[in-house]
């Protein structure tokens, strides 16, 4: 007799500061390890597996991450009741938001329509330590105006080989950035935040390893006047041969939302 599989799409949010990214790794506390351990308890040992729509790095947070739950033999009786039980047993820095059943044809990786990432930062001095889990502090004074212009250069279809960690000559690095802007932060507020904070917002179908952190690192170097706008233009050409090597810290990066086809 063949096992029947039931498929569920679960959206979650989490503070990634104490986790070593999404994917399970030996002897490290990861999000997938914590979620799978919690599921094993609330499902009372029922056979299951999880698959994320993307793997975030260590210390990266999320407001709208998504994973698929593959459940063997027996479906969930009550989705609302399951979600409540799941949240009750998850640690306080992970929260499940929604759950819905999907069919066998759904692909949590290939059916992504677009992802939106945010990068939150402030500059010019050392700020309150409570900022550290979700905001990068750049001690140097940055030229925000030129960084704003630089962010616009990433928008559109370009060769992003210079913005892929450990790229090689065999890959296809052409990607389309649907939207890229840098502006004052109005999304996140706290009484310990500095007076002015900023956010880079990037929207696209998919991103390569460390792509957004490399883009942000390049904008920081631009804000320091270590590179120019023309350097960014050149880096996006398929014959540039350039490598952008400053990876901005992970703790400022937030996966904001994922939309599916």
Image (spheres, rainbow, N blue to C red):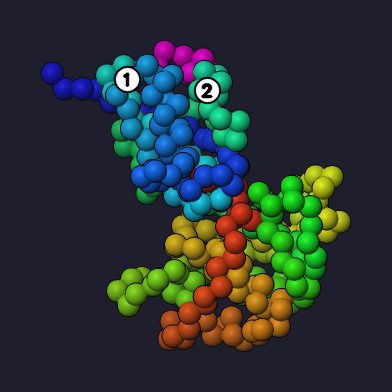
Which residue is at a point 60% across and 70% down the rendered structure image?
217
Decide if residue 93 is on the left or right side of residue 260. right
Furthest-left residue in this view: 1
Image quarter for residue 220?
bottom right
114 horizontally vs 7: left or right? right
Magenta extent: 76-82
Residue at numbered disc 1: 46
Q: Work out which residue is located at the far front of the displayed protein and give it.
A: 27
Mark 2 vs mark 1: which is more N-terminal? 1
Left or right side of 196 for 30:
left
The residue at the point 33 percent across, 32 percent down is 49
- Image quarter where the C terminus lies is top left
Count every numbered label the image shows and give the total.
2
State which quarter of the image contains the N terminus: top left
Few, some or many residues within 10 Å of mark 2 (<14, 14–19, 20+): some
Which element is circle 1 on? loop
Q: Nearer the viewer, residue 112 or 90?
A: 90
Where is residue 82 shown, x and y percent of the image? 48, 18
Front: mark 2 or 1: 2
Vertical placement of 13 versus 142: above or below? above
Residue drawn at the location 84% of the way across and 45% of the way down: 191
Q: Residue 71: x, y in percent?
A: 33, 25
Instruction: Determine the image quadrant of residue 88.
Output: top right
Residue drawn 52% across the image and 81% down it: 235
27, 49: nearer the viewer: 27
- Location of mark 2 (residue): 89
Give SS at disc 2.
helix
- In the drawing, what numbered circle is on residue 212? none
Q: Is residue 226 magenta?
A: no
């Amino acid at each position: 007799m063949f096992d029947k599989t039931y498929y569920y799409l679960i959206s979650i949010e989490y503070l990634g500061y104490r986790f070593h990214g999404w994917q399970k790794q030996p002897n490290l506390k990861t999000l997938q390890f914590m979620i799978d351990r919690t599921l094993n308890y609330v499902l009372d040992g029922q056979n299951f597996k999880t698959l994320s729509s993307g793997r975030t790095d260590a210390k990266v947070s999320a407001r709208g991450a998504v994973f698929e739950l593959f459940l063997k033999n027996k479906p969930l009786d009550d989705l609302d009741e399951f979600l409540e039980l799941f949240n009750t047993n998850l640690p306080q820095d992970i929260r499940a938001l929604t759950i819905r059943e999907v069919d066998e044809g759904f692909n949590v990786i290939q059916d992504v329509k677009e992802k939106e990432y945010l990068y939150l930062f402030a500059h010019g001095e050392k700020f309150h330590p409570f900022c550290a889990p979700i905001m990068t502090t750049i001690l140097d004074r940055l030229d925000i105006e030129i960084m704003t212009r630089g962010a616009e250069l990433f928008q559109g279809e370009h060769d992003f080989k210079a913005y892929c960690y450990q790229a090689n000559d065999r890959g296809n690095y052409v990607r389309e950035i649907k939207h890229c802007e840098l502006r004052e932060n109005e999304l996140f507020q706290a009484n310990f935040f500095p007076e002015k904070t900023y956010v880079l917002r990037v929207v696209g179908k998919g991103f390569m390893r460390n792509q957004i952190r490399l883009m942000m690192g390049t904008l920081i170097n631009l804000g320091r006047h270590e590179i120019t706008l023309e350097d960014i233009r050149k880096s996006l050409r398929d014959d540039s041969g350039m490598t952008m090597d400053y990876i901005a810290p992970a703790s400022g990066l937030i996966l904001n939302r994922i939309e599916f086809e």
